Amino acid sequence: MCLLAWAWQMDEHWPLILLGNRDERHHRPALPLHRWSGSNLVAGQDLEAGGTWLGVTGARRLAALTNVREPGSRAGTASRGRLVMDFLTTTRSLDEYVYDVQQRAQDYGGFNLLLREGDQMVVMSNRGISYQMLAPGFYMLSNAALDTPWPKSLRLKNLLCNNMTHVEAEWLTWLSDTAQAPDALLPDTGVGLVWERFLSASLIVSPAYGTRCSSLVRQGHDNHWEFREQTWAEDGKPQGACRIEKE
């Protein structure tokens, strides 16, 4: 993922409400949201490296990944998308998995990993603060550290925070905004002003690289959960939609 905002234990019906966009090269092959064969994992799938960017196993386990934007850095020797898949298919506890990843964090390019197991939610990273246990609240994450106030991240977090009762109706509108941020608000991540502008939109549209899918995940009580995904074509038009849920 490249844009995430979520409400953690801020709604009596949905302990976790998460919104996100995945940006990627359009020619990188991937499967849309589906139930993985031989597993209770529900996620899309990257067919180039075999992992995923966001997934759930039931109402009490979730993982999501963002890359850290660091132009010119060396590529990792291991796929970051496997971190999400491995957590969602392992029998290890959250604490055990975090410890294991910390021991081999140098094998990966820069990443932020959001993990939820039951009443615990953490963000871990191999850049900056390595481990943060999250208290109830509203959070945002893009291609930098947790709660870095990039314009699109802050906008999505504020929309979620101020419109919790309208999430079901408005989530796709919030994630499909193509407006770019004013230059004065753009971060300087080393990619140049033109790219900073281009990447500042919630929905990025171009023939080569852009937003591939938008997601809404809500995890409730008593194994009630839902996962919605909207995929996007290269021209920014809706391409396909999927909803998987358990009541």
Image (cartoon, rainbow, N blue to C red):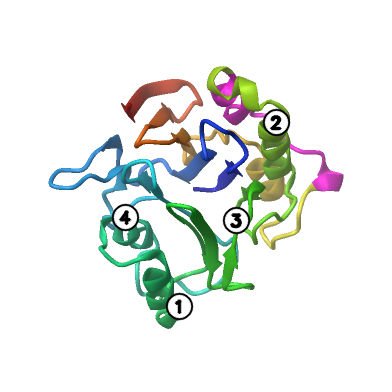
Instruction: Report the residue at 44% width, 21% height from top.
Output: 238
State which region is magenta. Answer: 170-185
Q: Nearer the viewer, residue 206 or 224?
A: 224
80 sits left or right of 235 in the view: left
Point out residue 197 in the picture as x, y percentages from the top left corner.
71, 43
Residue 159 circle label: 2
What amino acid type is highlighted by mark number 3?
Answer: Asn
Quadrant where the C terminus sits is top left
Q: Nearer the viewer, residue 119 or 235?
A: 119
Instruction: Report the residue at 37% width, 73% height from top.
Output: 96
**Rounded to the nearest whole Å, what is the CA distance between mark 4 and mark 2?**
29 Å
Query: How many numbered circles does the render carry?
Result: 4
Residue 143 circle label: 3
**Rounded to the nearest whole Å, what is the CA distance between mark 4 and mark 3?**
22 Å
Q: Is residue 140 above or below residue 229?
A: below
Residue 102 circle label: 1
Q: Indicate the quadrant where residue 117 lies.
A: bottom left
Q: Nearer the viewer, residue 153 or 194?
A: 153
**Rounded to the nearest whole Å, what is the CA distance between mark 3 and mark 1?**
19 Å
Q: Residue placed farthest to the left in the image?
A: 38
